[in-house]
Image: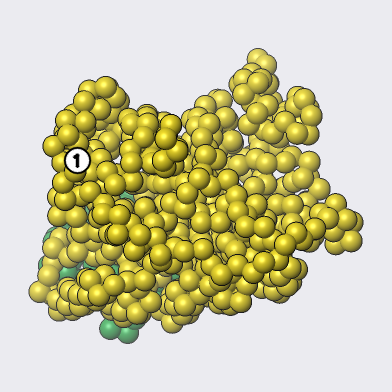
Amino acid sequence: MYRYDEFDAAFVNERVAQFSDQVRRRISGELTEDQFRPLRLMNGLYLQLHAYMLRVAVPYGTLNSRQMRMLAHIARKYDRGYGHFTTRQNIQYNWPKLRDVPAILADLASVEMHAIQTSGNCIRNVTTDQFAGAAADEIIDPRPVAEIIRQWSSLHPEFTFLPRKFKIAITGAPNDRAAVKFHDIGLMAQTNGSGEIGWAVYVGGGLGRTPMIAKLINGFVPHEHLLAYLESILRVYNRYGRRDNKYKARIKILVHEEGLENIKGQVEEEFAHIRGGVLTLPQEELDRINTYFAQPAYKDIGVVDIDIEREKIIDSAYGRFLENNTFPHARQGYTSVTISLKPIGGAPGDATADQMDVVADLAEKYSFDELRVSHEQNLVLPHVALTDLRAVYDALVEAELADANAGEITDMITCPGLDYCALANARSIPIAQDISQRFASPERQKEIGKLKIKISGCINACGHHHVGHIGILGVEKKGTELYQITVGGDGSEDAAVGKILGPGFVAEDVPDAIEKLVDAYIEKRESADETFIAAYRRLGDAPFKEALYGNG
Amino acid sequence: MSKILTGNELLSGATVYLDGHGNWVEDLQIARVFAKDESEALDAALAATKATGRVISLEIEDVEVRGGLVYPHRIRERIRAEGPTAPRFDRQHLDEDSHVSI
């Protein structure tokens, strides 16, 4: 993985020194809160309901064991022994104290991490496929390009005060596991007629109060011109994006209001000016970055035959783990293992410091020291030899991290909601807990098959409810938390925004409502192979609406 | 509508309330409840607190007194007073050097 060069290290260390002094001046009273607030936000330090929250960037969701151990150390020393992994592939600490934050940032810097640009109207952490660099279906490993985008966008002087925050997602595989069409810019690897690999560029996607599917603005941008093209988009957005209304300031609104063709014309004009200039990526620089992401020294394991059906009979929990939590690897004899952070009745995305240490040990011992955070709030050991799989599983069981529910109904994305978040209107975590307990039985989950539930505690949609096969949005009405249910959303390459079926439900009625939807699906599906989302596409709203509200 | 003054203490970030003695305290139940006709006192307390620079994210919240207990109207405020509900975590506490008075 990428290692900081002298410029990266100096830049991050300088920032730690600057912020340490800013904290000192704030505490002494030299800085007012109005002066300090933008400075702390630039360093990922928010104020939430109960305390400060520090959001630490995990660039494109990739980290090594040393970094994970440092995250555990921070949780233990400065927080309450746990952290929360987010849909942005980052980690959040919920209880840091202001005086400790400079020391936390110094600890992070010692392992080449920081919290810069995890807040504010700038280009945020680039997110990607959690199986990047490992997946069998990958056209190209997107991480080198993600790293180049990280370098380009870090403290970019022109794009530090954009109309609003800006999120870029990138995938190197045709099966989109990074929800790229719901980002301000989404990049998908493409091969052109000459067999060259470049990037299809989508623009203007997003969730929040106005969900939009990104539109294809350019079907093929070659590697060497990608930064120039991104800069062209950002320039047009920076110039014309609405600064008069926070709710209309994202690029999705600009693209929607001005029309794709108009925006495309402006971008192409800008691109014509800067194409071939200083942002052209030299091949040697691409090669240099690529070397950081070279394939690990795989062993020649050959064909390892794991009979999942047999394992399911011998040890059903392990069999289920094999079925759900392993993902096809590009290299024969290896697999990517999803470590679910969705225990039944737990808080989705939370991991204790001890669990982080275990995961770090496993990465070091069994995954070439590599780890990933998924936007679905799980962790991944990307390169596990099939011959080591049982040992990895046994260690996960020991650490209470072997929930074999990846991709099933209890593997929910859930925002922190009103238990932590200053913006939320309703709680999310207890809803997820109740649903996971309702569907706890492995047999029931298997019967239902792949189904993505996503829960947000407010319209800002951090829990991606719009793209849940079943989405749940918490609102507050007259002092009561109510939950609106949507059906039919999809964050994959078949992007779709879910539809609200009717009035909301009080919290205690949500598990029943979900069960009614699930039962309607099972009753109406053509076979167990037809997934919930496929059945919804074939059947439309009607049977689901009837299941929830009757046919009156 | 009765009101209370609440905010977060600068160093710990802890949720705090203004009590009847000008102290910013952790316990909602000893918060000073400003009656409808005490808006001048409320404004004065707000200004005095801002001058300390030690309580941030100041908010005026609607409450009622139910059976002798201060009951905020918003769910948000009820959760802020107690700490996260799921799983239940203790709220943030003030450190020794983070007590603020006006």
Q: Chain of mark 1?
A: A
Q: Nearer the viewer, residue B1 or A282?
A: A282
**Quadrant in the picture for the C terminus of chain A:** top right
Query: Where is residue A293, by image quadrant?
Result: bottom left
Q: Nearer the viewer, residue A139 or B92?
A: A139
Rendered residue at 78%/51% (across/down): A441
Q: Give the secondary structure at mark 1.
A: loop
Rendered residue at 41%/46% (across/down): A170
Packing grade of label 1 (10 A; few <14, some 14-19, many >=20) is many
Which amino acid lies under the numbered mark 1 shown in the image of this protein? Arg
Q: Which chain is yellow?
A: A
Query: Where is residue A387, by image quadrant?
Result: bottom right
How far across and down, in percent of the image, does residue A156 sit? 19, 55
Rendered residue at 66%/45% (across/down): A409
Question: Is A349 displayed left or right of A113 in the figure?
Answer: right
How far across and down, in percent of the image, does residue A186 sit? 38, 40
**Quadrant in the picture for the N terminus of chain A:** bottom left
